[in-house]
Image (spheres, coloured by chain):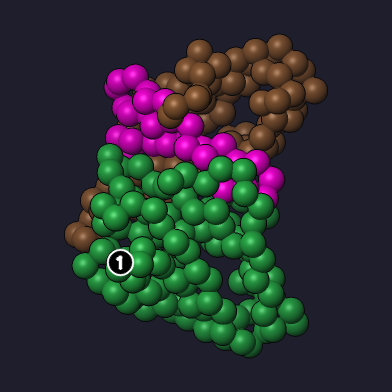
Chain colours: A green, B brown
Amino acid sequence: GESVGLHLPTLSVQEGDNSIINCAYSNSASDYFIWYKQESGKGPQFIIDIRSNMDKRQGQRVTVLLNKTVKHLSLQIAATQPGDSAVYFCAETPQGGKLIFGQGTELSVKP
Amino acid sequence: GAVVSQHPSWVICKSGTSVKIECRSLDFQATTMFWYRQFPKQSLMLMATSNEGSKATYEQGVEKDKFLINHASLTLSTLTVTSAHPEDSSFYICSANGGRREWRINIQYFGAGTRLSVL
C-alpha cells in the first residue's frame, strides 16, 4: 500500500560500520524495486535497483537483497560514511509504470 | 545518469495566487513524468502521472482543478497550483520515466524538488 502519514524510523550507526536498512513491500505482483537516497531539501537519488527474478545485486559499497517469499527488501551499506546520512526509501513497481514508495528510514552516521 | 531539472527550487506566494512549477528532462525524452508531494518527515505521495500529449492521470483524492498538469513536449511537464492556500504548502517533486532499458522496467529520475510556502 502507499505510505500515509507515518513518521520516519531512524537508524544510527558509527562511521565505518555496516548499515542495514529494511523495507517491507506490499504488492506481490511488483516485479521491479529501487532504493533511493534523499538528502534534506533535495529530490531522491537513485542508488540501486533489482528485478524480481534476482535475489541479490551489488553495487559500489551497496548491496540489495530481495526476499519475495516474505516481501522484504534490504539495503546494505558497507563502511558507512557521514555522507551516507540521509533518508532512504525503497520503491516498488506493481503496475502501470508507477512507483510506490515505502515509508523511509532516516540514517544517521556518527563520526 | 539522466538529469531532471525542476524550477523553481523555492517559492513563496500569497494566498489565492497561482504558482507554476516546471520539470524538464535534460538529456533524455520522457513520455511519462510524475508529480509527487512530500510533507516533512514523510514519504513521497504520488499526485499524478503526466503523459505527453494527453491528459494527466490523477491519484485518488487529488483535485485535478487545483493541480493543473501540462505535458506539452517530451522534455517538459508543468504543475500549476491554482488559487494556492496555506494548506498547499509542501515540497513538490517531479520525476521522469527513463523508460525500459534491458531488465530495468521503470527507472525514475527525480528533480531537486520545489518548496512551496503559501502565506
Say whether residue B41 is left or right of residue A58. right
**Residue at point 47%, 64% (across, down):** A23
Is residue B76 visible in the rendered image? The answer is no
Is residue B104 located in the magenta-colored stretch of the structure?
Answer: no
**Tag 1, which chain?**
A
Q: Answer with the quarter of the image where residue B29 lies.
A: top left
Is residue A7 visible in the rendered image? The answer is yes
Q: Position of residue A44 (x, y in %)?
A: 53, 53
Residue carrying label 1: A68
**Residue at point 66%, 35% (across, down):** B90
Quarter containing the C terminus of chain A? bottom right
Say whether residue A90 is left or right of residue A88. left
User: Is A103 located above or below residue B28 in the figure?
Assistant: below
Which residues, given as a range, are shown in magenta? B29-58
**Neighbourhood count class around disc 1 (C-alpha, 10 Å): few under 14, some 14–19, many 20 upward:** some
Q: Residue furthest front?
A: A70
Q: Answer with the quarter of the image where residue B1 lies.
A: bottom left
Q: Position of residue B3 (x, y in %)?
A: 44, 49
**Residue at point 47%, 17% (across, down):** B64
Q: Position of residue A51 (x, y in %)?
A: 27, 63
Q: Nearer the viewer, residue B96 or A71?
A: A71
Q: Nearer the viewer, residue B100 or A29?
A: A29
User: Is B63 located above or below residue B37 in the figure?
Assistant: above
Q: Position of residue A73 (x, y in %)?
A: 41, 67
Q: Identity of the amino acid at label 1?
A: Lys
User: Is A77 located above or below residue A68 in the figure?
Assistant: below
**Residue at point 33%, 36% (across, down):** B32
**Regarding mark 1 in the picture, which secondary structure is present there?**
loop
